Image (cartoon, rainbow, N blue to C red):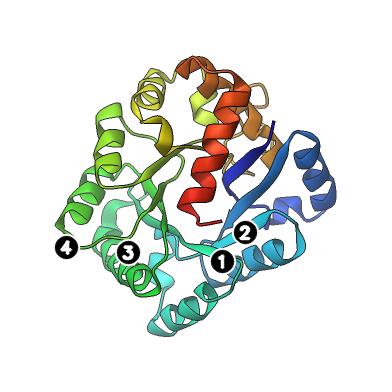
Amino acid sequence: MELMDAHCHLDDAQFDADRENVYARMLENGVVGGVDCGSDIESAQKAIWIAENYQGFYAAAGFHPHEAERMTADDLCTLKKLLAHPRVKALGEIGLDYYYDGDYKETQKRVLRDQLQLALEMDMPVVYHIRDAHGDMVEMLRAMPKRPGGVVHCFSGSAETALEYVRMGYYISFAGPLTFKKAPQLERACCAVPEDRLLVETDSPYMAPVPNRGKRNEPANVRYVLEKMAVLRGKTPEEMARITLSNTKRVYRL
C-alpha cells in the first residue's frame, strides 16, 4: 500500500533534530512522498530544500494568511521566481484565516487576490488554508471570472461547503481532525465528497491524528487519516490509498 502526504511541513524546526528518522518512519509506513508547503519566503525556500533532498517530496510556495501583513511587492516577485523551480508544484499555502484576529480581513483578501492572479499567470494549482472564513472564500472564488485549480487543505467545514468547493473544481484534503471522536461534521463531509476529489494529509507537525493526538505529528501518521476515511467510505485501506494517491498526483501534476 502506497500513500502520499498531500500537505506537510517537514521543513519545520521541530524536525531539525531527527528529520532523517522521521523520513525513514514515513517510508516504513508506506508513505512514498509528500508536498511540503511554505508559509512565507523563508519557509518556502526550506520546503524547496526538502524537495531537493528527500526523494518523493515536492514543494509549494506562498504566503499564509497569518503572514499577509508582511508580504511586499518584492516578496511577490521573489515568490514568482520560487514558483519556477522544477520541484515546486503549487502556490500555497494561501487563503483566509479569521480564527485569531479578524481585524486584518481586508489585508488577507488583498494578498490572497494578488497570489491567485500569480497562480493564474504561472498556471499552477493553489493550496488553500481556510479557517473560520469559508463564507468569504466562497464569495471571492465565485466572483472570479477565471480561477486556478487546487486543494482546500485540512478541510474544516460542512458537507455543503465541501461540495461547493468541488463544484468550483477543487479537491478536498482531510487531516488528523477526521479521526477525532467528536467530528461528525467532518465525517459527513468526507462521505459527501466525490471519490475523485479526496486527498489525505497530516499538516505535520500539527494536529496529529488518533492514536497520536497531542503528540508531534509526522508524515507516517497519514495512514491513520486514510484508515478512518476508508471506514467512512466503505473501502479497504488499499483501495482508499490507490484513490488518494492518484488524486494527489493529478492535482499536483506529478
Neighbours of disc 1 within 10 Å: few (<14), some (14-19), many (20+): many
Question: Could you give the CA–CA distance between mark 1 and mark 3, rounded to whole angstroms?
Answer: 19 Å
Residue found 58% across the figure and 18% down from its top: 236
The residue type indicated by label 4 comes to: Pro
Q: Is residue 196 left or right of residue 138?
A: right
Front position among marks 2 and 3? 2
Mark drawn on residue 58: 2
Question: Picture quarter containing residue 238?
Answer: top right
The tag earlier along the polypeptide, 1 or 4, is: 1
Nearer-the-camera pick, 34 or 12: 34
Front position among marks 1 and 3? 1
Q: Position of residue 146 (x, y in %)?
A: 22, 63
Mark drawn on residue 88: 1
Q: Position of residue 149 (x, y in %)?
A: 35, 55
Mark drawn on residue 145: 4
Residues under numbered marks 2 and 1 in contact, where contact means CB atoms less than 8 Å apart? yes
**If the image is split into quadrants, where does the C terminus sit?**
bottom right
Neighbours of disc 3 within 10 Å: few (<14), some (14-19), many (20+): many
**If the image is split into quadrants, where does the N terminus sit?**
top right
The residue type indicated by label 3 comes to: Leu
The residue type indicated by label 2 comes to: Tyr
Residue found 32% across the figure and 41% down from its top: 132
